[in-house]
Image (cartoon, rainbow, N blue to C red):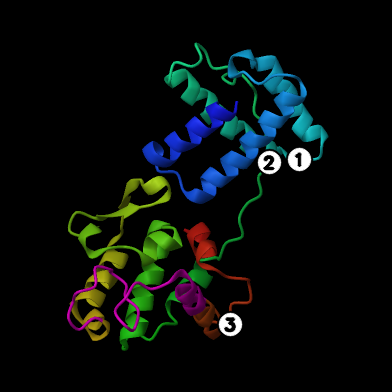
Amino acid sequence: MDAAIEGYLAWARIEKGLSENTLSNYSRDLELLKRWLQDRKIDDPASVNRALLSEYMAWLLDTGRSMRTAARHRAAYRQLFRFLVREGVLESDPSLLVEAPRPSMTLPSVLSEEEVELLLSMPDATTSIGQRDLAMLETLYATGLRVTELVQLRRENLHLDAGYIMVRGKGNKERVIPIGDRASALIRVWLSGYRGELDPGGQSPWVFVSPKGGCLSRGAFWYRIKHYARLADIRKPISPHKLRHSF
């Protein structure tokens, strides 16, 4: 099992480009499965079957893990066994028919449409920072981008005439995101004038630049949203992720 897990994690890092955080979670979850199997005198992946994995799922729940945690463990070992079948180590995938626990889902807290419009009315569009923030807020609300994707949006990935943008998100995967007329118009205004005040030489590749022309940080954008929420007297807890949920 040690060799199987190490081989899978190396492949996932190099071939799939999984983030270090995801790899760390998978490594921890697979280590627990390995120890559970070793307690039952099993150390060969070929000896693992559906019944054993179903028993393992029941053990996770019996020992106090939540259904959501158990589902995450299942996702980890399914990736492992798929890899072993792909590599020819196993002839069949023992995890294929193991049922997943069904976590209860809670609806994310969101802003109302009126609150979103109020928030969007707060930036002072007569200043470079205000125009940037307005374009960012509208883009976030109009597209549902993750905050990291928004602050790291590059000029070369704007295709406003065609009505879309390209972003590189989790797992280093590119996605095509439609963008509406209102967000497109605000980005055009930002690029055509005010952006030059923060990046006079036009050398920065980022769409939304910091006051020094660099890439705006997640924390700085979060601070700006909190600032506008206070101006709008929005009492709900607010974050960039909540605006994404509101989309």
Between 133 and 184, the one nearer to me in the picture = 133
Left or right, residue 58 beside residue 145: right
Q: Check disc 3 and report the residue beneath it.
A: 233
On the image, numbered disc 1 is attached to which residue? 65
Residue ranking furthest to the bottom: 126
> Is residue 6 placed above or below 236 in the rendered structure?
above
Front label number (2 vs 3): 2
Q: Is residue 121 something one can see in this rendering?
A: yes
The amino acid type found where label 2 is placed reads Thr
Judged from the image, the secondary structure of the residue bearing numbered disc 2 is: helix
Q: Amino acid at mark 3?
A: Asp
Between the C-alphas of marks 2 and 3, the distance is: 37 Å
As drawn, which residue projects farthest toward the front? 3
Residue 87 located within the stretch drawn in magenta: no
SS at badge 3: loop
Q: Residue at x 49, y 70 (%)?
A: 116
- The image shows a total of numbered marks equal to 3
Residue 58 horizontal/vertical position (percent) = 76, 27
Look at label 1 and name its amino acid.
Answer: Arg
Instruction: Find residue 192 and report its image quarter.
Output: bottom left
Label 2–label 3 contact, CB within 8 A: no
Magenta segment range?
A: 199-225
Up-down relation of residue 55 to residue 242 (above or below): above
The residue wearing badge 2 is 69
219 drawn magenta: yes
